[in-house]
Image (tube, rainbow, N blue to C red):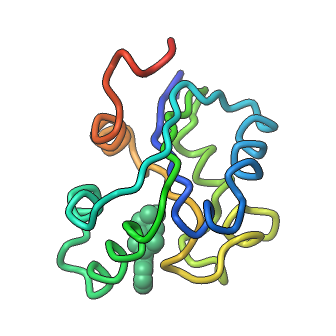
Amino acid sequence: MGLQRTLSIVKPDGVRKGNIGEVIRRFETSGIRVVAMRMLHLTKKEAEGFYAVHRERPFFGSLTEFMSSGPIVVMVLEGENVIARNRSLMGATDPKKADRGTIRADLADNVEQNIVHGSDAPETAETEISYFFNKLDIIS
Ligand code: CMP
């Protein structure tokens, strides 16, 4: 696998519920490094751009409404095999199906408002990281 980077987002529900620190604690406890971080409030258009691959899905409107409903925290995570490790820390998209002890099982309310986002593959990680960060923003 080797050293990888991935994009993580604490979504508006996570920020509203005061879960920023809890999410980062779980990353750091499992040996994942935060190498870039920023808080921002997406416009609807910016949320639509980020989730463009889902534009045909029935939940696209409500997802992008939600993602632009308040501030988010975007992070670049780095570590060995970090894409898969982050996904296993997050748990399944639907918190009802997520394993116990995962971020979504412990903190999320429903399949849409599911606290965190994480890239699902190396190519998407690269695209998603560059949606929010310049090369010089990332600590190496
Ligand atoms: P995420 O991992 O950010 O990728 C796409 C997002 O769409 C997902 O998390 C959820 O927030 C949302 N999502 C996925 N499936 C559904 C669904 N069935 N209904 C509503 N929102 C969904």
Location of residue 102 in the rendering, given as x and y in whole percent from the top left corner = 74, 62
Question: Relative to the observer, which residue lies in front, 72 or 58?
Answer: 72
Left or right of residue 28, residue 9 in this image: left
Residue furthest out toward the top? 140
Question: Relative to the observer, which residue lies in front, 107 or 20?
Answer: 20
Q: Tell me which residue sits at (70%, 51%) in the image.
A: 23
Question: Relative to the observer, which residue lies in front, 75 or 81?
Answer: 75
Residue furthest out toward the bottom? 58
Count the numbered circles shown: 0
Q: Within the displayed image, which quadrant is ligand 1 positioned in?
A: bottom left
Q: Tell me which residue sits at (65%, 54%) in the image.
A: 88
Q: Is 55 situated above or below 74?
A: below
Q: Is 98 situated above or below 39?
A: below
**Quarter of the image where one finds residue 57:** bottom left
Q: Tell me which residue sits at (32%, 45%) in the image.
A: 124
Left or right of residue 47, residue 10 in this image: right
Location of residue 51 in the rendering, given as x and y in whole percent from the top left corner = 28, 62
Location of residue 47 in the rendering, given as x and y in whole percent from the top left corner = 29, 62
